[in-house]
Amino acid sequence: MKKTTLLIAALFGSVMAAQAQYSQNLTLSNLNIRIGGAYPMEDRTRDFTGNQFAIGFDFRNSYSLIKGSQGYFSFDWYAGSSSGKKGKIFPILWNQKFTLSQKEGFAPYYFAGVGMASVDFTSQKWVFAYRGGVGVDLGERIFTELTYLGSEAQGGVRVNSLGLFVGYKF
């Protein structure tokens, strides 16, 4: 567990250093927070986690891999409980967001991301992970998202979850 914590801290520090290179002032204005729940799509995953609650943080920046979209890092934590029970998922992904239209107070979008996830089903392991989904900006600060999170198998179990989030933009 100590190795995992150190790895996560090192990854977070690296991401923040990279973010600082692309942004002159690193402020909360680049942060989104999301809270929601997820339903594992596979029976074996549900056996380990049950329904999950989740919290996520998005760090937006001006760098984008695809013209006309916004790039951002996402850090999430999915868990079936706050106890030491197996089944925790911690994805760290690079995402691209594509806004579909800009109407006053209502802006639908879709997004896709790839990266790695720390998965603790049978034992803790880092695996390839991806996510995609649709969302709606419901105003200047509030948004909601429907997401799909997937991964390669770890101990014969995949992350593969459908989630619903409500978020706030700082």
Image: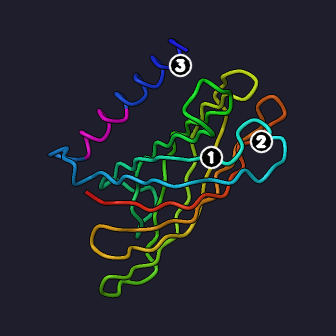
Residue type at numbered disc 2: Thr
Q: Is residue 162 above or below residue 27?
A: below
* Viewer-nearest residue: 28 or 77: 77
Q: How many marks?
A: 3
- Outermost residue on the top side: it is 2
Name the residue beneath numbered marker 3. Answer: 4
**Counting other residues with Cα less than 10 Å from the Cα at mark 3, is it few (<14), some (14-19), or many (20 or more)?**
few
Dot label at residue 62? none
Would you identify the image quadrant in which residue 112 lies?
Answer: bottom right
Residue type at numbered disc 1: Gln
State yes or no: residue 19 in magenta: yes
Residue type at numbered disc 3: Thr
Judging from the image, what secondary structure is the residue with disc 3 in?
helix
Judging from the image, what secondary structure is the residue with disc 1 in?
strand
Q: Sequence order check: which comes first, mark 3 or mark 1?
A: 3
Q: Residue at x 37, y 52 (%)?
A: 33
Indicate the position of residue 74 as horizontal and vertical percent values.
Answer: 45, 47
Name the residue beneath numbered marker 1. Answer: 52
Q: Is residue 122 above or below residue 80?
A: above
